[in-house]
Amino acid sequence: MKLKQPYFLPFILICMFLSCKKSKETGAEIQASGSKIIHNQEAILPSGNFDTIINNKQVNLYWLKNDKIKAAFTNYGGRLAALWVPDVNGQMTDVVVGMNSVKAFIESTEPYFGATIGRVGNRIAGGKFTLKGRTYTVPQNNNGNALHGGNKGFQDVVWEAKQPNDSTLILHYKSPDMEEGFPGNLDVTVTYVLTSDRGLQMEYEAVTDKATPVNLTNHAFFNLNGEGKGSILNHKVQIYADKFTPVDSTLIPLGNLIDVNGTPFDFKDSHTIGERIEIDDEQLKNGGGYDHNFVLTGKQFNRMNHAATVIGDKSGIVMNIYTKEPGLQFYSGNFMQGKNIFKSGVSDEYRTAFAMETQHFPDAPNQPEFPSIILEPNEKYHTISQYKFTVINQ
């Protein structure tokens, strides 16, 4: 035994070294694994899937974050691709549906997922309007009407992007005179900011050298239970509106306002989306469900209209919507057909997401009784909307 001790001691030391090394490596693996958990959002949305050139302009993916929430945008179409907020258990949940690549956004049968919309959000009847004695024509891309700016709206352009800090993205686009038939060179800036109170703020600014209609918004599609978590019909909705704008079968406003009392459009008190969506109602038939503009009552919060409150039935996530706009377009996902694959790997099945677009009223250039959307050369277009997230009982 005495002869073997010199050999045994180095053996022990070697084993201790290897054990220590293995422990350190295991610790590194655990740390790496933790990093993957922390940064798994980036894995869902690989930056390489957005790093491309379109029309000689660079496209990228931009991450916005603070210590409360996190979002991903691409400057192709000024799109909100994802938005993570905590649910009632503190689990980070992606409440915005979208694609995991520019290619998928381009090829989608729904062109507006998460997009910044312009020049004119919503519909223009027949794609025509008259301004200062001249009639202008916008391409008809939706049942004989112009929708969201025509064939190539702002959802299809590459915006100049600047990220001055972790929580802010500034997008800029110059829309040339007569683009999609709209008069005037329109200079647009949209600033997206994640706020310290779990909010996403959208600030829109524009100037023009000729009178032109402008109605900017964002077309995020939400599922507050999380992308791919099924139907939104059990989400609870409250909309602070006494009236809505009824529409014809092509979703063009009839020009009048209808009181919501006694109708399935009365969301002054909370109702689930699916509670009345299938009843025999002409307006629901025209929209295939809810696809209507609500006239906000002017209920104020921080000098903005409190437009709506939506609650995810499974997540407990509460979304409050505030805006300086007079209207809110509520869309219940009626035209989703399961033809597109979201970043989570699930398809966009019927009514698995909804939209709440802050805006002026549809077809405003042809409806003299509606608030005007005409921007003059000596004016500045400026409006702000916010989505703020809490959880129930908070």
Image (spheres, rainbow, N blue to C red):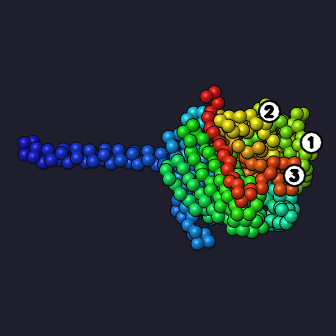
Pointer 1 residue: 280
Is residue 258 rendered to the left or right of residue 180? right
Pick out the residue farthest to the left. Answer: 2
Amino acid tagged 2: Lys
Q: Give percent across and percent down for residue 12.
A: 18, 44
Quarter that holds the C terminus: top right
Tell which tag, 2 or 3, sits nearer the viewer. Answer: 3
Kindly tell me whether residue 342 is visible in this rendering.
Answer: no
Which quadrant is the N terminus positioned in? Answer: top left
* Residue type at tag 3: Pro
Does 188 sit above or below residue 260? Answer: below
Report which residue position mark 3 lands on: 368
Residue ID for mark 2? 268
Of the pair 380 and 245, the residue shown nearer to us: 380
Looking at this view, name the residue that lies furthest to the front.
Answer: 378
Q: CA distance from mark 1 to mark 2?
A: 21 Å
- For label 1, the SS is loop
Q: Earlier in the sequence, mark 1 or mark 2?
A: 2
Q: Earlier in the sequence, mark 1 or mark 3?
A: 1
Q: CA distance from mark 1 to mark 3?
A: 31 Å
Q: Write the residue at 88% across / 37% down.
A: 259
Q: Nearer the viewer, residue 209 or 292?
A: 209
Q: Residue at x 50, y 53 (%)?
A: 164
Q: Position of residue 163 (x, y in %)?
A: 52, 54
